[in-house]
Amino acid sequence: MAEEQVTVGDFELHNCIASGNTTQIWEVSEQGAPMRLAMKLLLADAHKQGVEKSLLKHEFKVGSLLEHPGFLRFHQLEVNRDHGFFTMDFVRSPSLKQHMSSSMPGVQSSFQKMAESLCRAFQFMHDQGWLHRDIKPENILVNKAGESKVIDFSLSTRVKSGFGKFMAGKQSIQGTRKYIAPETILKQSADQKTDQYSLGVTFFELVTGNLPFAGSTPNDLLKKHIGETPPPPSAINPNVTVELENVILKMLEKKPADRFDSMQEVGAAMRGLKCFIEDPVELNERMLRKDKEEQTMSVDKRLDSRADADRTAKGITTPVAKKKKRKPTAAMLLEEQKRKEQQPAPAEPAEPAAPIMQPMQYPAPGHYYPGQPMPGQPMPGQPMPGQPMPGQPMPGQPMPGQVYPGQLMPAQPYPVPQAMPLVAGGQQPVPTQAATAPVSAPQQNTPPIPVQPAATAPQPPVDQDAPQDATESEVQGLMDTIE
């Protein structure tokens, strides 16, 4: 279709919503009517191919039979030599794939409601005798309220059972490799559990953000669908609960017999199920705040490092922040008290046992105690007979601090005698003190001389030339002479 063309049949084209290899989706309105519709229009090259025209008619036929809230309502089909299209309800909702790219936490937050509605829609389709066979996020429209609509029935086929499966023989491989079931790859007959596998891959991608299988080549990816066990969703997203994980892994079983019996059973397993440990939106906001705080701290550290480098270059010492003393809380004090109470009490020291008294043992006659001297020998610490005690001078030697006989005492002046006056009447003379006081010897820093009470100090030698005091006999003689 040329770009200048603005009308197709009785419809005006307003906005191209999506474009594929053979078709385009347009927002249109019927001439003279305000209601907006969606149109699936064959491109010019595809319009020349009979197969593409047949697929367009087939999709309109299936869509017209699915009158359910989970599907779009189809209105009009027109295929002629000029163009081929059909119209359906226009929903201003992006696909689930677009929602995942813009706001994965929002999609996960409404996952349970959306999963239950999708199970009801596909169960209705199966009850009508049709399989979708191309379930993926691109073919599901979701509005802000979490309501979903399934689109694209170009690969839909009739459900075959019993004799129909036997006569069908080998089937062609149709579908999208990322979401295709193992039995489809093996060209086996498809049934309701084939759609269940594709929906399980979609659920896996919704709760983890990743596909269960990825291959370097298309054939490698198909081999993994056939023989590789999918990883647990909680290994990719720890916020996924074990209950939801078990439901998804059962939908992805390799053998159809190991999966749920129907989409209705899958919806029942989802009903009332806690899908996530923490609300995905709240978790995402908390992680964003944490990343922002870490980023701010990182910037602050870089600024501090730059400031420290500038101070170091200028020879300025980097200031050290003082550690703030943490004030103990009531909980901390209670914990400390409990810890002290739990400590074992110190053991009291045991009283020493009373010594056992041994009976006194006396030595046999002629024997002596250890350390006792033999007869005639002194006790330990006593000198032998005739020897002085330790520290006592030998006989004839002066005591320490004394002088030999005839030797003057050091710095000892002799008193000068004076004439004794006689008192008349035969009275005894009154001694007078010396005219001069004795000269004190110079003080020396010498230790005091010990005085032995038993020893007698020797008399100093008599100087014949020095005056001496008269003796008592001499005084008496003088008294007799005067009388």
Image: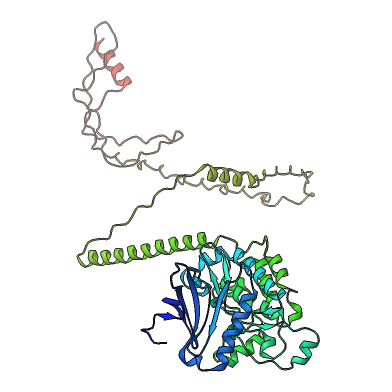
Q: Residue at x 67, y 44 (%)?
A: 349
Foreground: 277 or 147? 147
Quarter of the image containing the C terminus?
top left
Residue 158: which quarter of the image?
Answer: bottom right
Foreground: 2 or 135? 2
For residue 341, above or below residue 81: above
Foreground: 90 or 181? 90
Residue 422: which quarter of the image?
Answer: top left
Q: How is the image coloured?
A: rainbow
Number of numbered discs overlaid on the protein picture: 0
The x, y position of residue 352, in whole percent, is 70, 44
Is 32 left or right of 118, judged from the image as shown?
left
Q: Residue at x 25, y 31 (%)?
A: 414
The x, y position of residue 10, in whole percent, is 46, 78
The x, y position of residue 452, in whole percent, is 43, 36
Any part of residue 405 in sight: yes
Any part of residue 213 in sight: no
Quarter of the image containing the N terminus?
bottom left
For residue 385, above or below residue 416: below
Foreground: 231 or 77? 77
Is 416 left or right of 146, judged from the image as shown?
left
For residue 69, above or below residue 440: below
The x, y position of residue 399, in whole percent, is 41, 42
Is 157 left or right of 422, judged from the image as shown?
right
